[in-house]
Image: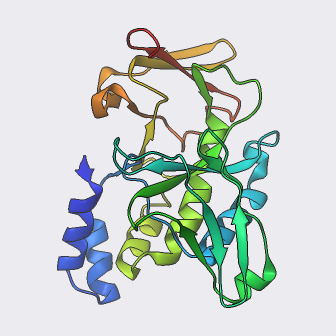
């Protein structure tokens, strides 16, 4: 399985012409996207694309709300005192940040018209973001598959705004990052796990050991596999005691 960064380097080496990029895509069998490398902050317009994707695909998680999670880029950075603003020429909107690091991005037409930026009161690169979609009443040791599918759709909508033609060509040729069996999105568990299983009604499958990595916190689930319903749960077996 090829790492995402190496794969992109291969495609860029092939040149920028569409025909050359298409030939490079033919050589690709699978892509692994590492969710630990959360993207840096984008423009407000890109985040609105994520809001649109959430509304268009909310049937994947009808009882959930869209929030985003703010993550320090290194363990020594604290979230305490961090503020988020949507800022343009005439726009200045404060975005409340919850104690758990989550926030809801507001819709504002004036900010969109101004192509506003998302501003943190910390130096660039200190924090990353990712979608956080949680259906109520899902156990603390589990994630709902439809929630993960919708998170992927939101992230793809935001990220594609800044992708090069080569990267967009790659993902679309593979069938899209959220619905293709040839793309593996690495997820991040709440803490280290020894393993996990997929559960849907009477069906239960234990994940192979190779699906767990990243110091025991990462895992891969079949977002593309329609035989698993959106209500299927990914149940974690945590490694060691809490804390």
Q: Is residue 243 left or right of residue 99?
A: left
Q: Residue at x 57, y 67 (%)?
A: 158
Q: Residue at x 43, y 68 (%)?
A: 173
Nearer to us in this view, 243 or 56: 243
Q: Residue at x 76, y 24 (%)?
A: 137
Q: Position of residue 228 (x, y in %)?
A: 61, 31
Q: Is residue 243 left or right of residue 208?
A: right
Q: Is residue 218 above or below residue 201?
A: below
Q: Is residue 226 above or below residue 84?
A: above
Q: Is residue 220 above or below residue 235?
A: below
Q: Position of residue 133 (x, y in %)?
A: 67, 43
Where on the picture, by quarter, is residue 201? Answer: top right
Nearer to us in this view, 129 or 205: 129
Nearer to us in this view, 70 or 63: 70
Q: Residue at x 55, y 39 (%)?
A: 225
Q: Position of residue 147 (x, y in %)?
A: 65, 40
Q: Position of residue 84 (x, y in %)?
A: 61, 63
For residue 147, say whether it is visible.
yes
What color scheme is it? rainbow
Where on the picture, by quarter, is residue 226? Answer: top right
Q: Is residue 135 left or right of residue 176?
A: right
Where on the picture, by quarter, is residue 170? Answer: bottom left
Q: Is residue 198 above or below residue 152?
A: above
């Amino acid at each position: 399985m090829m790492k995402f960064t190496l794969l992109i380097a291969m495609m860029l080496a092939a040149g920028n012409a569409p025909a050359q990029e298409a030939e490079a895509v033919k050589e690709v069998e699978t892509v692994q996207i590492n969710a630990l490398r959360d993207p840096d902050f984008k423009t407000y317009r890109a985040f609105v694309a994520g809001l649109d994707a959430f509304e268009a695909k909310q049937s994947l998680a009808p009882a959930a709300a869209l929030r985003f999670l703010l993550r320090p880029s290194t363990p020594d950075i604290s979230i305490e005192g961090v503020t988020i603003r949507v800022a343009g020429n005439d726009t200045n909107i404060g975005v409340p940040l919850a104690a758990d690091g989550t926030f809801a991005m507001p819709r504002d037409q004036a900010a969109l018209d101004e192509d506003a930026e998302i501003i943190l009161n910390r130096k660039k690169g200190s924090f990353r973001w990712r979608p956080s979609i949680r259906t109520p009443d899902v156990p603390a040791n589990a994630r709902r598959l439809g929630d993960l599918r919708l998170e992927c759709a939101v992230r793809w909508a935001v990220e594609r705004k800044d992708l090069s033609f080569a990267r967009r060509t790659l993902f679309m040729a593979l069938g899209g990052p959220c619905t293709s069996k040839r793309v593996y999105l690495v997820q991040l568990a709440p803490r280290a796990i020894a393993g996990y299983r997929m559960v849907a009604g009477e069906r239960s499958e234990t994940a192979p050991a190779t699906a767990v990595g990243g110091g025991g916190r990462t895992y891969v689930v079949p977002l593309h596999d329609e035989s698993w319903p959106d209500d299927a749960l990914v149940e974690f077996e945590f490694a060691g005691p809490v804390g």
